Amino acid sequence: MTNPSMLRTLAAAAVGAALAWAATAAAHHGWSGYSEKAERFTGVVRAVEYGNPHVTMELEAKDRTWHVVLAPPSRMEGRGLPRKGLSVGDSATVEAYRHETKEGELRAEWIEVGGKRTELR
Amino acid sequence: MQAAEVSAWLEGTAVATAVREGLWLYPAVETVHILSVATLFGSILLLDARLLGASPRLPLDVLARHALRPVYFALPALVVTGALMFSADASALVGNAAFRAKMVLVPLALLNALALELGWLRLLRRQPARQIPAAAKVFAAASLALWIGVIICGRLIAYV
């Protein structure tokens, strides 16, 4: 026997389950256009473009230079990695996903520099 | 002048640099862009729907004046905010397929709107009780398709 409050509870539970599923799915997969396989890259920062729409850097790691897409400047600052925290010559590690078609491009899940990890998603 | 040279020059201007390097200026400009496209599309949707036959008791002349007024503000806002965002990242955008498609669809949508205005809206405003001609409906349908295409391309810029 369905009544309005039971339907409301059911609807809320369904929405909650959908959101939880979506959140876990996002946590374990890449970004649209990028591989789902997370890899770690450790190396030296060769260039930084700290600007909108996304901060990017060139990272020398695994015998080549990668174009790494990070996050918008507002997000980077808000999460503790301001412009002055990422400089040429710094040693950095990223957990990142390779672009599916653009050779040499990565999108990072997080970046570790100066002993501190910054989440980017 | 090559596209690459113009893009690089544009990106180097003080305005483009401010938009690119500021923390909140780019997202603020982008938000105004989105509010403007919502305003433009919502207004045009109501007018196009009326032209396609919806709500026939709604006087077309009154609706057209009401619906188009917000568009006269939204269009310049779209151009200005779009130009600001473009200048910040011009080199990447000129090569972006979704951006290029959008830059083809926007002029087409505007030309279509002009044709609708000059061809039928003037006439229908003077004779609001008149049946809407089939040709006007074709342009109204094209209007919807073109603006939906513009919005899709705009969103896809970040994904291609």
Image: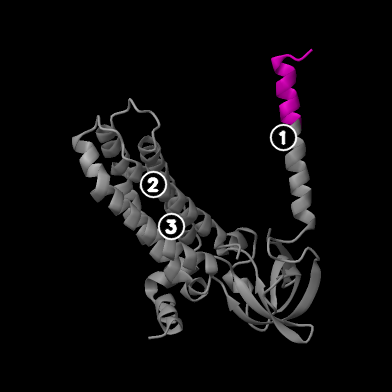
2 or 3: mark nearer the eye: 2
The disc at residue B15 is: none
Secondary-structure class at tag 1 = helix
Q: Earlier in the sequence, mark 2 or mark 3?
A: 3
Q: Magenta residues, as a range?
A: A1-13
Give the alpha-carbon distance from disc 2 to disc 3, as whole Å: 34 Å
In the rendered image, residue B58, in percent from the top left (x then y), is placed at 32, 28
The disc at residue B29 is: 3
- For disc 3, the chain is B
Same-chain status of marks 1 and 2 = no
Q: Amino acid at mark 3?
A: Val
Q: Residue furthest left?
A: B126
**Residue that label 1 marks:** A15
Q: Nearer the viewer, residue A110 or A53?
A: A53
In the rendered image, residue A76, in percent from the top left (x then y), is placed at 61, 63
Same-chain status of marks 2 and 3 = yes
Q: Nearer the viewer, residue A90 or B52?
A: B52
Secondary-structure class at tag 2 = helix
Which quadrant, please, contains the C terminus of chain A?
Answer: bottom right
